[in-house]
Amino acid sequence: MKKRTGKILALLLSLTMVAGAMAGCGSEKADSTSGTQTEATTSADTAGKKTFVFGDTTFNAENEESNIDPHSAYCGWACIRYGVGETLMKINDSMQLEPWIAEGYELVDDLTWKITLKDGVCFSNGKSCDAEAVKKCLEDLVAVHERAAGDLKIDSMEADGLVLTIHTTEACPSLMNYLSEPYGCIIDMDEGVTEDGIVVGTGPFVATELVTDDHLNLVKNENYWDGNVNVDEITVRTISDGDTLALALQSGEINAAYGMAYASYPVFENDNYQFTSVQTSRSFYVQMNYASPVVADDAVREAIAMGIDKESFVNVLLNGYGYVATGAFPDTVDFGGSALHAKTYDPEGAKEVLEAAGWKDSDGDGIREKDGQKLTIKWLTYPSRQELPLLAEAAQSTLKEIGMDVQINATADHNSIWKDTSAWDVYVGANVNCGLGDPTNFFSTHCLDASTKNRGQYHSDKLEELAVQLNSTFDTTERNQIAIEMQQQLLDDNAFVFCSFLKMSMISQANVTGLTAHACDYYELTADLDIN
């Protein structure tokens, strides 16, 4: 396999890796011919090997996860979730930052960070993961990944053994948090990336075959630096339809599932299955399109915010597997929503706001109009998150009560459609808003002039000023307060409506152990995974 700038060759690793191969760096393996797993099996012991099949609704091109190359779009999520890649830092169960591949770090001055790597960490091919390897990885990342380049603000780096020194172009208080982001998975750039998007990482599993929107095959990393890996072979199957996913788990085609529709949960509430659940910061949110003549009207945005019944969405449609949101972040973090004020469900108040702004139902058809224009809201969302179509249908009903005609477009093509600002009025999605244990990432990605996901072209002078303060402040207490002010600005402008946060669950057969839901939603298949 050559570097991404050269002609890429496929990485082929054997599915029958030698169990007695020496673990640890320095025991580099030669490439061998790969077998192809064409049928998934959930047998815990096939030909003396433990195998595991995982069904996931979200591993697909629709979610910008067409492969496991962390330097491409949001593919780092698949890389880290499925145990191929690991990051320098990680977020623990308390949503606090801690070293992972790194041993520790030091802020030398406002523009200089010194990171010391753990001794003995190696890639799955046996090569040492030293500072030079990390430097090559981060250099490629910021060269090809626009969002990462903007987040990390790397000016230059020096590698000396296990010590990596990073110089930033400006103060970057969140740098260590950003290095726990899935795009920060450390991969071996000497091996590069195959044509189908397979990379070599330091995690407990090695990818052998990948077919976008279908499956990913993994084998045990015999060189894993951090202990024994229990499962020999894994197949991750993309099953985007929730009903199909439920049937696959019921029939035994898969051992565990991520993204199950809540309506299917009662089927698995028995001794044959188990749930692992945790509250997360994955928010279901409405993003307003300021390029839309309708939504640019302050009264329309305010009425939408008052016309969505968050409580019913959580309690009825999500069956309680979530909690109502106020701001961008949950109350479980110090910069969360407890100090914020957001619009609450008030259909009568929403009607009054629209009436005062000149939106009236003059022809008696139940839909308001103004200056000859119907109050039609084009609602863009996507189906791979089972909850989003439910939210769309609920909002369509409650907003109709106040005189809005909501036209839903739930499509896998949402990432191309939102780029045409004439094609939608509100974009409704799901995002982990503080998976890094820090508030910066949400604002820098979604809300600012330079944000790659500021789909609705929202602008606020005050928010831009606060962002400058946030990005130059190292004191945690001050940062938390700035983040609260920034959220309140979003709420005052009705630029976003934060509907709920997800209580994320994975469902598995009762004999599965070591599969644990995590609050940041990054870590899924680990060395602890086992099936008995």
Image: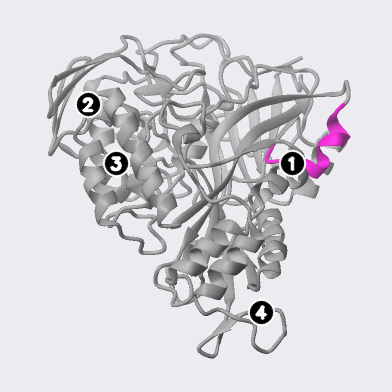
Q: In the depicted view, which residue is nearer to us: 358 or 204? A: 358
Provide residue 449's location: percent of width, then percent of height: 28, 57
Mark 4 neighbour density, 10 Å: few (under 14) some (14–19) many (20 or more): many
Provide residue 456's location: percent of width, then percent of height: 41, 64
Mark 3 neighbour density, 10 Å: few (under 14) some (14–19) many (20 or more): many
326 lies left or right of 388: left
Q: Is residue 93 magenta?
A: no
Compared with residue 101, is residue 286 higher up or lower down, i.e. above or below? Answer: below
Instruction: Please tell me which of labels 4 and 3 falls first in the chain.
Output: 3
Mark 1 neighbour density, 10 Å: few (under 14) some (14–19) many (20 or more): some
Residue type at the position of mark 1:
Asn
Q: CA distance from mark 3 to mark 1?
A: 41 Å
Q: Quadrant of the N terminus?
A: top left
Give the labeled residue for mark 1.
315
Residue type at the position of mark 4:
Ile
Q: Which mark is residue 474?
A: 2
Specify the segment rendered in magenta.
258-269
The residue mark sitting in front, 2 or 1, is 1
Q: Quadrant of residue 180?
A: top left
Give the labeled residue for mark 4.
367
Q: Which mark is residue 141?
A: 3
Q: Secondary structure at mark 1?
A: helix
Q: Secondary structure at mark 4?
A: loop
Residue type at the position of mark 3:
Leu
Q: Quadrant of the C terminus?
A: top right
Q: Residue at x 21, y 39 (%)?
A: 469
Residue type at the position of mark 2:
Phe
The residue mark sitting in front, 1 or 4, is 4
Compared with residue 359, is residue 225 higher up or lower down, i.e. above or below? Answer: above
Q: In the depicted view, which residue is nearer to us: 14 or 420? A: 420
Q: In the depicted view, which residue is nearer to us: 493 or 31? A: 493
